[in-house]
Image: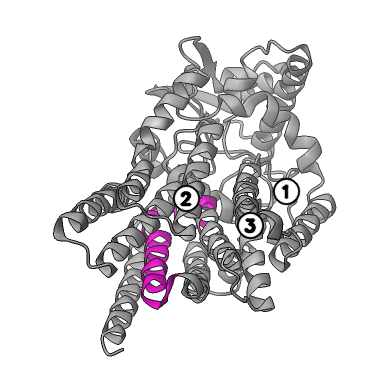
Amino acid sequence: MAKVEPVSNLYILGGLVIVVLGIVLSLIVLPGPDLLWRLHIADGLLNGKQMYRDLLEVNPPLWFWAALPAAWLAQQTPILAYHALIGINMAVIISATFLLFHLAKKTLGASAAAATAFGFLFALCLVSVGDFGQREQSLMMACGLWIALLSARLEGREVALPIAILVGLISAYGFALKHYFVLLPLVLEAWFLWRQKRAWTPFRPENFTLAICALAYAAAIWRFAPDFLGRMLDLIQTAYYAFGPWNAFSSFERKVRLGMQGLFVFVPLAIMVLTKERRPFCIALAIAIVVCLAIVMLQQKGWRYHFVAAHGLSVVLSIMIVQQTFAKQETRSKVALPLLATLTLIWTLVAMPAIGSVQTRGQIIEPLIRSIVAKEPKDSRIFILSIGPDNAFHPLADAGRSYWSRYYSMWMMPGLLTPNKSPKLEAIRKVEKERVRAEFIEDIQCSRPNLIIGEVGYVRTPNPIRFDAISYLTEDPNFKAWLDAHYVIERDIGPYPIRRVNPAKPPSAPCNRVPKQP
């Protein structure tokens, strides 16, 4: 027994170091545009705006509603909203880690459970550097807790009712953030059914909790965000497929590239085979890793944060296997390969991205747009018309300036400018194309910006479509007349046409209240 205590203390000390390091890195690396947009929406909701009317967003509302406490804290105190979000997330992560340790101890033993909890905390804090608070981080947390609970059930261990309900609540949030995420509890339940066979029952407290949360969420959407199902679904099905860094590639090409990007998740699976790892907890983790990778493939987007859950669970599984090889007192040759593979995995999936994020201090803003924004007086209202949120919302949020559009950016334009082969979707596309134009025109005319920054370029190569943001809006003759009357053309800066307010004939005062700075 005397040998166990130092090991436990070592894990506790390592956990404290990880928490401190995670907080420090989250403060050094500036939040990405998605997280700033999330807080911008939460702040708008607290100020009386309605999602899918005043703030148009393609994602379901739960992720934004969950940011309301951080936004409220920022309104009531000098604390920045993102710092409040970090604090809340870290408190949940630490609580979830203790909960996982409590459950894992029932099936793995104290030492292995401590290693599992350590890996869980490590993954949650450090795999998400630069994306702290993203949905995939919450999915990773939900998977770890759900697997720990299923493993305890599988071995017939008694689980207290409050613990089962708490796991159900945390997991319900993680699984509900994207509709793709529902695959995880379904696949894991199928595995649980296969393992238990006739002893299986779906009538368990955690399942009841999931079901109640799902019904409550559906009711909340119907009551507080009814326009998501009406207003946004048409835009999503006609335009979202064309949004993203890989919109130039075919569906097959995207899957190939994503598969190459996710190859490292097979490292722990290979270690499992080599070490003949058969513990149910590890098998369930391996299943979850594969499902998380499948979810990335289904989304067909190229952003790194989509891999957070798959990468994080891979790190947890690798650490569990290494701990087991040491616990079995295997020969050096049998320990060396899993250890080397795990260290390589951590270096590739955790250390290298974290170092890169620290060096850039987060997502880099396009230098030309940054320079344009920086030269404007602080009281100058700027409206950026760009396809990418990185060039529309993010530069203004990063500079602490007000953002005037109801949309994240003109992300929908590649899809709206591409004719659809389906007659039904083509009819919807034409309606949405006109509706989106009218909404951007209203936002510009109401905000009366001092400076309008457009964007010109080609989208969806190899079937290139030329995109000119200002020309798209001035297809409306009334807006063209208004723009020509009140704005003068300045020299283009790279691919960004510039329109500045005419000092001799400025438009009337803004027709809406000034939004709070993001």
Residue in the picture at 55% in, 75% down = 77
Callout 2 touching callout 3 (CB < 8 Å): no
| Disc 3 to disc 1, C-alpha distance | 44 Å
Residue 428's label in the rendered image is none
Residue 213 visible in the current orientation: yes
| Disc 1 to disc 2, C-alpha distance | 27 Å
Please indicate whether residue 414 sits to the left or right of residue 345 in the image.
Answer: right
Q: In the rendered view, how is the structure colored?
A: one colour
**Residue of label 3:** 196
Mark nearest the camera among 1 and 2 is 2
Q: Amino acid at mark 1?
A: Met
Callout 1 touching callout 2 (CB < 8 Å): no
Please report the bounds of the magenta region as a residue range.
Answer: 108-137
Q: Nearer the viewer, residue 66 or 170?
A: 170
Mark nearest the camera among 3 and 1 is 3
| Disc 2 to disc 3, C-alpha distance | 27 Å
**Residue of label 2:** 309
Please indicate whether residue 298 sits to the left or right of residue 447 in the image.
Answer: left
N-terminal label among 3 and 1: 1
N-terminal label among 2 and 3: 3
Q: Residue furthest front?
A: 198
**Residue of label 1:** 51
Q: Nearer the viewer, residue 130 or 438?
A: 130
Q: Quadrant of the C terminus?
A: bottom right
